[in-house]
């Protein structure tokens, strides 16, 4: 069994230029409303998008999208997929057989938030993970398919999910999932992503 840390990867956009191009799409769409396309310059998107945000004209942010791959556990993805409007593609336990070589013949679980490695709570968690892995491989050994055997897999199972949403929805996600009431593991996943985006496009990715 492998214990891994959660994290994220950009699918698109991935570069500053691509992020700026997405911002310029928002400006182009928004200026159509005012018929002010003649005022577009190389960096006019900054002031224009700030104006849109100030006037709460959030619909224009829906003209650009972002795709992020999250590496986290099944429990956190159960919360992520509650968001709308968004598209999701997730590693499937129906079709993935973790006893195969491509998975190193083991399950992977996300490092828990229940204590340090020498805490009793961590030892309890670790024992549960090891028991789940043993049960899963036994089910496969008995001839059950991965989609049946997955019933014994833990919520801590590592999974990967690609989330695609427009910028307006991403702001909504960050507002909910970085709040004090959010699950601490969700906060730990979303906060670094939000801060990174805020440094790239503060005109868009600033919570208010």
Image: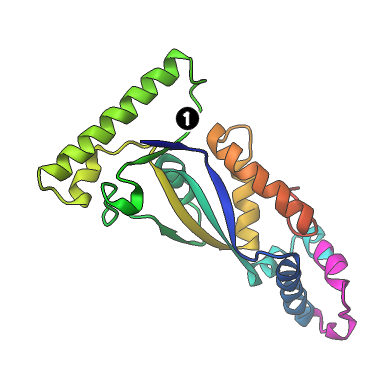
Question: Residue 32 magenta-drawn?
Answer: no
- Please report the bounds of the magenta region as a residue range: 34-50
Name the quadrant containing residue 202.
bottom right
Q: Quadrant of the N terminus?
A: top left
In front of the other: 149 or 80: 149
Name the quadrant containing residue 126.
top left
Please give the name of the residue rendered at 87% of the width and 66% of the height, measured from the top-left corner: 47
Regarding residue 135, the answer to whether it shows in the image is yes
Please name the residue that numbered disc 1 is placed on: 112
Question: Residue 46 magenta-drawn?
Answer: yes
Regarding residue 183, the answer to whether it shows in the image is no
In front of the other: 97 or 38: 97
Disc 1 crowd, CA 10 A, few/some/many (<14, 14-19, 20+): some
Q: Residue furthest left?
A: 142
What is the x, y in percent for residue 142? 10, 42
Q: Is residue 123 left or right of residue 84?
A: left
Q: Is residue 124 left or right of residue 61?
A: left
Considering the numbered disc 1 on the image, is that residue within a helix, a strand or a loop? loop
Chief secondary structure of the magenta span? helix
Please give the name of the residue rendered at 57% of the width and 50% of the height, measured from the top-left corner: 8
Please give the name of the residue rendered at 16% of the width and 41% of the height, measured from the top-left corner: 139
What is the x, y in percent for residue 79? 46, 45
Q: Is residue 184 above or below residue 60?
A: above
């Amino acid at each position: 069994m492998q214990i891994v840390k959660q994290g994220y990867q950009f699918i698109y956009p991935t570069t500053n230029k691509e992020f700026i191009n997405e911002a310029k799409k928002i400006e182009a769409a928004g200026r159509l409303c005012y018929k002010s396309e003649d005022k577009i310059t190389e960096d006019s998107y900054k002031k224009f998008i700030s104006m849109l945000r100030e006037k709460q004209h959030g619909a224009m942010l829906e003209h650009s999208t972002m795709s992020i791959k999250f590496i986290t556990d099944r429990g956190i993805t159960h919360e992520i997929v509650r968001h709308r409007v968004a598209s999701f593609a997730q590693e499937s336990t129906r079709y993935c057989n973790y006893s195969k070589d491509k998975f190193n013949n083991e399950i992977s679980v996300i490092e828990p938030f229940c204590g340090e490695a020498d805490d009793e709570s961590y030892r309890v968690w670790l024992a549960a993970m090891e028991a789940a892995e043993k049960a899963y491989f036994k089910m496969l050994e008995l001839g059950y398919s991965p989609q049946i055997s997955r019933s014994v897999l833990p919520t801590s199972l590592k999974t990967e999910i690609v989330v695609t949403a427009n910028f307006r929805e991403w702001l909504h996600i960050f507002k909910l999932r970085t709040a004090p009431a959010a699950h601490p593991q969700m906060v730990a996943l979303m906060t670094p992503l939000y801060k990174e985006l805020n440094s790239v496009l503060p005109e868009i990715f600033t919570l208010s």
